[in-house]
Image: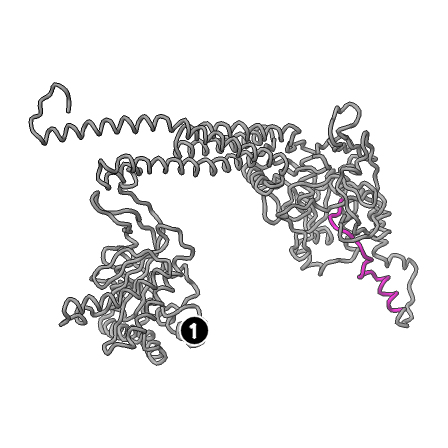
Amino acid sequence: MVAGRPPASSLETETDVSDIRWQDRMTQVSGQGAARPSSLSRLTLVAGSLVLAICLIAMRTWPAATEVLTNQLFDGYQRLLPREATEPPVVVVDIDEASIAELGQWPWSRRVIATIVDRLHALGAAAIGFDIVFSEPDRLSLSRAVDDLRQRGAVVSLPSGAEELDSDADLARALAEANAAVGLALTDEGRDTPPKPKAGFAFGGTDPRQYLTHFHGAIRNIEPLQTSATGAGFFSFATSRDNVIRAMPLAAVAGDEIFPALSVETLRIAQGASGFVIRTSDASGQGGGGNPAMVDLRVGELTVPTDSDGRMRVYYSGMPNMSVIRAADLATDRMSAEASAAVMGRIVLIGTSAVGLRDIVATPIASAMPGVNVHAEIIDQIVSGSFLKEPDWAEGATLLAAFLSGLILIGVASRSGALFSTLAFLLLSAALVAASWLAFAKGQYLLDPVGPTLTLLVVFLVLIPLRLALENREKRFVKNAFGRYLAPALVERLANEPRALQLGGETRRVTVLFSDIRGFTTLSEGMDPQALTGLINNILTPLTDVLLKGEATIDKYIGDAIMAFWNAPLDIDRHEEKACRAALAMLGVVDTLNRSRSEPIRIGIGLNTGEACVGNLGSAQRFSYSALGDSVNLASRIESLTKLYGVDIAISEFTRQAVPDFAFLELDLVRVKGRSAPVRLHALLGDETLARQPEFIALQEQHDEFIRLYRRGSFIAARARLGVLRGIAPPTIGALYEIYAERLASLLAEPPGEAWDGVYVARSK
């Protein structure tokens, strides 16, 4: 009671006392609530800081954990912003499928290869490189055939100059006359001794053999070719987890010798340089600390920055301006004047794009690229001087970015709820990726945002559940505090997010099913309410079980009808197929029920797939999760049409397209009521097992031909085909052909003329 105020009545007095108690309780609650945020913030700060520290340690000690994601991100950068196209200093001679078809299967005679080399040399090629290894003598050499004949006892007399029959010698001569580099494959699979390098490597500081990539052996060229060639370079790519070629070793070790890559070897030959110079991090004047590492490679007048073990990150352009010459055109001297001019003064790489020769690789900008094109990209990139940069300070910058962004997220999460924390996480993640992209776009720097972003994600995934758990504890506190003073429904609304009670929806692609019991009105005549209820429940219960087992959402029961849909509220993989299987299973349930009934039951089922609005639909007082839209209405119309066509299951073309392997027969092209565009309907007769049976395939072929004749307006031919169909059709679709027989009779009696479009107009819903 308030002092100084007389009570007007006992009711008023009770109300006043209640008001006082309410105010006291609110004061108590707000006092307790005021102390809770600091406790919540402290817990969030401590937990977040601990998780952040663990993530930073993991980033420092286990950088390979994010390698796949980082590579995929940088691949995306290259696809969005490839290296600027140039007029490349390189030409590719392609041993393509067409050349193989023209000149015969690979390998070709070395005489053909010699002819190609001679013509390239005559055209003024600065250097010629082979992305091919000639590891065995030419099996097509005439000298080899002569030797074989002599071994078999034949007497072969050769004219003077017989040494020219040796095609390997012919190719060796051509290589010696041209500035050519043969290719070799460095490998860990074989143990063959590598050949001696053609060019030497000068270096200062630590011997590069300590940090360059090592191989155990090599697949080398036969000795005459190896000896005659001006240079030799390996074409073996650097391996990666996903087999995408992102980097290329410019120098590697095999048999204690340092070998150059084919790309830099041809650059050396083209410039007339005698060797290479490797700059090491601990060389004089470099001021490097830590483990020795390669800094760059000098090739003549060109300097190529590398990573620590001698690899160069390839920045692809796609080489849209590069000339590609078919090998057959060179071999048969059919080159155009433009192609001939393109060779002058350029490096020529000879390789293959033929799939059967297995030199197709994946790159950041293409899932399939000839390996020779990758070597061409490297040459073009070196000459243009456009390199991707992975500076020494990149790792430190990545750790710093993870630390600062993590601190910001922890600060936001400790002072705000899940929504603002989520926004902070998204903004920080976007900022990290944007900064990485700008560094790439403006300066070709590769700064990894994946590690910091994953750190943010881990911190977020730890803090948000923790925050929600603490907030749920507060909700329980609210319920306990106000449970005595408010109605339970009001307490629940007070404790939960009010927006959860509002109406809302989303547009999703769903598959909708309508089913209905045929002739239910006649079936239910004379039944009392209890018997009718029992009948409905006995039918709908097993049908509902089938739908739920098929991952359907039961929308509603409309008398004896069921409406259900798939792919909402949860994503359902292959929802069209699951809907079709559920419909077939419903027919199986009805067959089981009919075994114990004297009067059989039949149902009709309609299916359609399309966009629909799904969500909590209804009024502010009452709503339920449902679907609405044109696709839902069409499913209902299709179910109604099952009666007209005498089939159990009818589906639209939109559902049919997603389930190609089931047994379908086209019903008709129908313009349903309320829809201007006609819809192609199909009868679903069975699953893929039935679809593969010869009897059904024969029926389907006859049926499709009938529909084609009918829709073309060839009614007499269609009627003849219909006679065949009625003789082989199963009873389940006999009614369909009776309907078409009546329709054809009417059309023949009163031909529709030129207005015929094959569309049936449904007059009712």
Report the residue marked by disc 1: 697
Q: Is residue 493 above or below residue 220?
A: above
Residue 348 x, y percent position in the rendering: 73, 43
Residue 545 x, y percent position in the rendering: 33, 63
Q: Which residues are magenta?
A: 129-150
Q: Nearer the viewer, residue 538 or 484?
A: 484
Q: Is residue 742 above or below residue 271?
A: below
Q: Looking at the rendering, in which quadrant would you find the N terminus?
A: top left
Residue 50 x, y percent position in the rendering: 53, 32
Q: Is residue 439 left or right of residue 39?
A: right
Task: Give the residue displayed 20% in from the left and 44% down from the top.
Answer: 621
Mark 1 Cα-neighbour bin, 10 Å: few <14, some 14–19, many ≥20? some
Q: Secondary structure at mark 1?
A: helix
Task: Give the residue displayed 44% in from the left and 37% down from the top.
Answer: 466
Task: Give the residue displayed 45% in from the left and 72% down from the top.
Answer: 692
Residue 297 x, y percent position in the rendering: 75, 33
